[in-house]
Image (cartoon, helix red, strand yellow):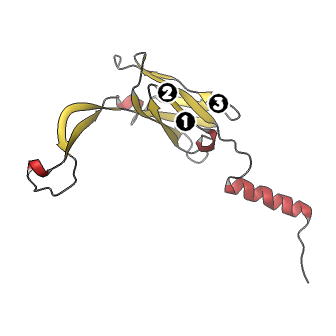
Amino acid sequence: MKRHLTVPTVVFLACLLGSVGGCGGSNRAAVKGKITIDGVPLPEGTIDFIPVDKTTGNTAGARVANGDYAIRAEQGLFPGEYQVQVRAERPTSKKVWDGIGEDRAPASKKTMVEQLESYLPARYNDRTELHAKIEAGKVNVCDFDLQLGKK
């Protein structure tokens, strides 16, 4: 005996597969904003949004250029509370070996690159104090003015 799927069953299965596979509508939200340091745009860096409740959200991030960043809805965040981490590096004017090539090679044979240092305090990244609330159905604007002068 052959079994046939009813129309309501087919519709239900299509909706179920669409939600699992990422097809159809999504409640991910776009996020954009400006990051400044003591009022001046951050030249370059990264921003990451980490869900406070790891079971209900995803992590997303973006590059920061001239203070601006943007995360499109397709790669965006689900609604909820997020910790925010901002990272930035700058040159130290020191040269270090890039690690490519043989360790025992003479210095003249090693490739030297400019050493970079992280210059934002841990309160903005590893032990972040920054938070954002993301809402569905809109472009969330999350601006951060980081203060290097205060503790």
Image coordinates of residue 70 in percent, x first then y, are: 54, 33
Residue assigned mark 2: 68
Residue assigned mark 3: 139
Q: What residue type is labelled 1?
A: Tyr
Total number of numbered discs in the rendering: 3
Residue assigned mark 1: 82
- Find numbered disc 3 in the image and state the secondary structure of the residue it sits on: strand
**Crowd tier of the residue under label 1, counting other residues whose Cα lies within 10 Å: few below 14, some 14–19, many 20 or above:** many
- Find numbered disc 2 in the image and state the secondary structure of the residue it sits on: strand
Quick one: quadrant of the N terminus? bottom right
Of badges 3 and 1, nearer the viewer stands 3
Q: Which amino acid does label 3 sit on?
A: Val
- Whichever of labels 3 and 2 marks the residue nearer the N terminus, that label is 2
Q: Is residue 48 left or right of residue 110?
A: right
Q: How far apart are marks 3 and 2 (CA)?
A: 14 Å
Quick one: quadrant of the C terminus? top left
Q: In this view, does 122 lie to the left or right of 69?
A: left
Quadrant of res 30 = top right
Q: Residue furthest front?
A: 108
Q: Which amino acid does label 2 sit on?
A: Asp
Residue pictured at 69% horizontal, 56% vertical: 20
Image coordinates of residue 105 in percent, x first then y, are: 10, 55
Q: In this view, does 48 lie to the left or right of 11?
A: left
